[in-house]
Amino acid sequence: MFGISGGEFALLLLLALLIFGPDQLPKAAQQVGRVLRQLRKMANSASNDIKEGLGPEYKDFDVQDLNPKRFVQKHFWEGEEDEQPKKAARLNGKRPPFDDEAT
């Protein structure tokens, strides 16, 4: 879901129950849901505004392409003619671990 395990989720739920109490917890969850929906709507609106502002020559533009990691993936790993090195670099279908200190 958000990169948390079941035990961590249960702990967060228990903390929320202790902080807000059983009476206020449904109201707090409802407000959080409302805020998340509104943020998603704002993000989609901004994305559509960017696409409209760029014009028809960028009709296949994806806002996610602005993420540097996605840019590298799109331009260096997708569409390779030789797929064998790409598959050989994977371990059990997953990318090899990345070491922040090595770069």
Image: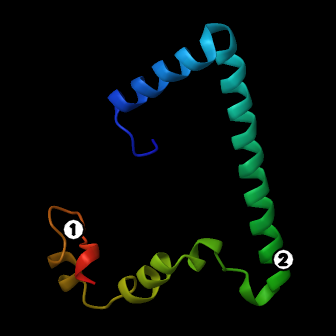
Residue that carries the numbered disc 1 in the rendered image: 97
Is 30 situated above or below 56? above
Q: Which residue is mark 2?
A: 52
Tell me which residue sits at (20%, 76%) in the image: 87
Does the CB distance between marks 2 and 1 fall below 8 Å?
no
Residue 59, x across and y down, in percent? 73, 81
21 to the left or right of 86: right
In front of the other: label 2 or label 1?
Answer: 1
Of the 4 image quadrants, the one containing the N terminus is top left
Q: Is residue 11 or residue 55 the one in the foreground?
A: 11
| Image quarter hosting the C terminus | bottom left
Q: Is residue 83 above or below residue 99?
A: below
Q: How would you rate the neighbour count of disc 2 (Cα within 10 Å): few for under 14, some for 14-19, many for 20 or more?
A: few
Q: Position of residue 69 (x, y in %)?
A: 45, 77
Residue furthest toward the top?
23
In which quadrant of the rendered view does residue 101 lie?
Answer: bottom left
Among the 4 quarters of the image, the one containing residue 16? top right
Helix, strand or loop status at disc 1: loop
State how many labels appear. 2
Location of residue 37 in the rendering, given as x and y in whole percent from the top left corner: 73, 42
The residue at the point 39 percent across, 86 percent down is 79
Q: CA distance from mark 2 to mark 1?
A: 39 Å
Q: Is residue 43 left or right of residue 5?
A: right
- Identified at 25% across, 90% down, the residue is 82
- Name which residue type carries label 2: Glu
Nearer the observer, 4 or 37: 4
